[in-house]
Image (cartoon, rainbow, N blue to C red):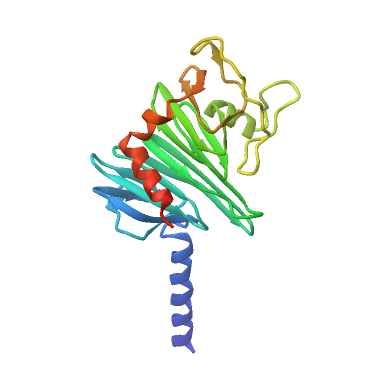
Amino acid sequence: MKRFNIILFAIIGFFWLQAFGPSGGKEFGKITLPLGKVEVRGKDNDKWERAMPNRKVFQGDIIRTLAKSRCEISLRGGGKVRIGENSELELNEVNIKPMEKNFKANLKKGNAWVAAKAAFGEKKNVSIRTPTAVAAIRGTKYRTKAGEEESSILVYEGKVDVNQPKNVEKSSKGGGLKPGGKPKFKFGPLKEVAAPTEVAGPYEVTLEDWISLVEGMQINVRKDGKYHMFKFDQAADADLDFVKWNKELDEQP
């Protein structure tokens, strides 16, 4: 009987580690395509480990790429997040429910590409934070570049809601952004706010609430909260190596 209990606990422990990882974090997905030098560090670990193909990653893990390196993360339940060279992505939160999948990550530096279409009747929400902006999507495709002074977000398909990190934090604490309060930020559907059709000039308007971008639009958000939104040159953008790589992968079955 004692031997049976030991085996049973070992089996339970194995499956617990498979689902939640060594530090207890929920499974975020797995690294399906590490190219070059890609490393992973757990939230309770100070050591970087080389990422091998199909390595599972968990909530709290940090993934980084060095020079001439790239990485694809397949999200649990479908969808992709890819990061370019010299990038660092922290996997903050994941919440998987029937017909609803929610992911939140922090792009500390570098480039990220998100392709996360939702299945019929499903809600799929992916939020990527940069030092100066937060992009939240519901089954769409976009690219973001993180910078300490300025970040950019380009939309290739669907819609992307954008705000400042400090506004998101303020609303999530229940303080609201204006008298009367705005809805708290969460992974579920965000209240859509129509994007302005024109901006008087580059960086003359401060981003104070969620705005929505559609396909072909780009927004650059500075550290001071001022932003510039415009249609980007899709032909020139398509010639970028990182963009080509992502589009080729997205076209694969």
Observer-nearest of 235 and 182 = 235
Residue 118 pos. (x, y %): 58, 51
Expressed as whole percent of the image width and height from the top left, the position of residue 180 reads 76, 24
Q: Which residue is drawn at 41% across and 60% down?
A: 22
Which residue: 45% across, 76% down?
A: 11
Residue 147, image quadrant? top left
Relative vertical location of residue 235 with respect to residue 85 in this rendering, above or below: above
Image quadrant where one finds the C terminus: bottom left
Image location of residue 194, percent across then percent down: 66, 26
Q: Please state which of residues 96 and 197 is positioned toward the viewer in this rendering.
A: 197
Residue at image location 29% in from the left, 58% down from the top: 52
Q: Residue at x 38, y 44 (%)?
A: 246
Residue 154 in view, yes or no: yes
- Residue at the extreme right: 180
Number of marks present in the image shown: 0
Is there any visible trace of residue 87 in the rendered image?
Answer: no
User: What residue occupies the far front of the structure in this picture?
Assistant: 235
**Which one is in front, 167 or 139?**
139
- 79 sits to left or right of 198: left
Q: Quadrant of residue 185?
A: top right
Depth check, front residue: 86 or 253 = 253
**Above or below 92: residue 27:** below
Q: In this view, does 193 lie to the left or right of 148?
A: right
Relative height, residue 127 to residue 130 (above, below): below
Q: Where is residue 115 in the image (x, y as percent from the top left)?
A: 48, 46
Can you say whether 161 is above or below 97 in the image? Answer: above
Which residue extends farthest bottom? Answer: 1
